[in-house]
Amino acid sequence: MRYELYYWPGIQGRGEFVRLALEEAAADYVDVARGDGGENAMLTLLRGDAVVRPPFAPPFLKAGRRIIGQTANILLFLGPRHRLTPGDEAGRLWTHQLQLTIADLVAEVHDTHHPIASSLYYEDQRPEATRRAADLRARRLPKYLGYFERILARHSDGAGYLAGRRLTYVDLSLFQAVEGLRYAFPNAMAALEPRLSATMRLCARVRERPRIAAYLASSRRLPFSEEGIFRHYPELDPGKSRTR
Amino acid sequence: MRYELYYWPGIQGRGEFVRLALEEAAADYVDVARGDGGENAMLTLLRGDAVVRPPFAPPFLKAGRRIIGQTANILLFLGPRHRLTPGDEAGRLWTHQLQLTIADLVAEVHDTHHPIASSLYYEDQRPEATRRAADLRARRLPKYLGYFERILARHSDGAGYLAGRRLTYVDLSLFQAVEGLRYAFPNAMAALEPRLSATMRLCARVRERPRIAAYLASSRRLPFSEEGIFRHYPELDPGKSRTR
């Protein structure tokens, strides 16, 4: 069975967390909205008139006749099918719990450039974005990334993965979040990274996995950009000389 | 086994979604942080030095030796144990997908009064809150609530529940979200409710379930307040005469 992934074409966005899992699993999938007429097909499914269980928003995954929405829920579905989650229920819930925490982080990162409304341009909410991004850099990033670091450093059985002795989908997602943060907030991340050594080791290992490395080098991997969730606006990530 | 629920005392917050499920299930549980020394016990677990799988934030649930965090993940755990989710995997994922969509809505509602930083007071982000709340009222609430209404009206097998022919935890959560929105945004909700008849029917049915009715009438049910997620600030919900 070939999976159909539906997500906005042109950006990594939340779809990328699903893509990384599909790529690591060497799963057969097509990125529908990037093909001819694919975006219209996605919008038709989203309107949901003919769909019994319509998704609220992209990304969603079509698996046979089933349509599964919400990024973390798609990974919950894919995990046991592709050995990307622990075999026991407690381990699966833990992996999912961490994934939901990454989802919270991603939503907060999105809101640094859209603190008022997704329906407005960044340029229409710039002063608010400046305030919100300052809080993300000063408080929220250290809290989130410190949390994952603590788990990796203390509680990972020495294997260096977040949930047990093998790689799971949440390791891929933490890699993606860190990559995005490095793109969007290079100065803030440069200041934090010395305290994130276990996280950086995990990210390096993910990047070197053969299927992930091949994917990152392929045209299937879209670049980060100022259309996505992780956006680099220099004014939201001032360098040392500009911080007070 | 007695469950231990850990959440900030004094507010409904995200803990309430778990409480409603525990109450409907007539589960044996204690609301730890509302008892003597309970908040300190919660904070100790949160610091996580002695916890192999520490939660990022409340609420979390202790079930025997396991600690489970993230509201939606706790419900994912409780659902099959207390017949609050469908018996088949597809139904369970659909229920969870809807729960994650409610979690997104709840986060957006929180950010109407804290659009810049959770670490600041509402009073320190009031102009931004006014802008963000206007967008919630005009665009986001109709989108979210219209989505759930469409599912209930078209796709619920006529049973009037979100996920199949029986009540699930996500029905309880939608009830809680609507109750909170009615408290926080009475004017906006009064304008929307005529288009939400299936949702209002579901909420009435939830409210009348014997265990839920008993819970709502008990001292265990905390009131909504301006310390929680759903806050009523009149300036964020202007009446007809004040809208342009």
Image (spheres, coloured by chain):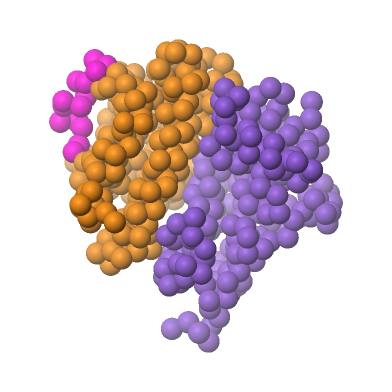
Chain colours: A purple, B orange
Q: Is residue B203 visible?
A: yes
Quadrant location, the N terminus of chain B: top left
Residue B39 relative to residue A2: left or right: left
Asked where in the image residue B115 lies, by quadrant, the reply is bottom left
| B163 w.r.t. A78: above or below | above
In percent of width and height, residue A1 lies at 79, 26
Q: Can residue B152 be found in the magenta stretch?
A: no
The magenta span reads B208-223
In percent of width and height, residue A16 lies at 67, 48
Residue A64 relative to residue B46: left or right: right
| B134 w.r.t. A96: above or below | below
In percent of width and height, residue A151 lies at 54, 50
Residue nearer the viewer, B159 or A205? B159
Residue A105 relative to residue A215: left or right: left
Residue nearer the viewer, B179 or A188? B179
Residue at x 43%, y 39% (from the top left corner): B144
Residue nearer the viewer, B104 or B25? B104
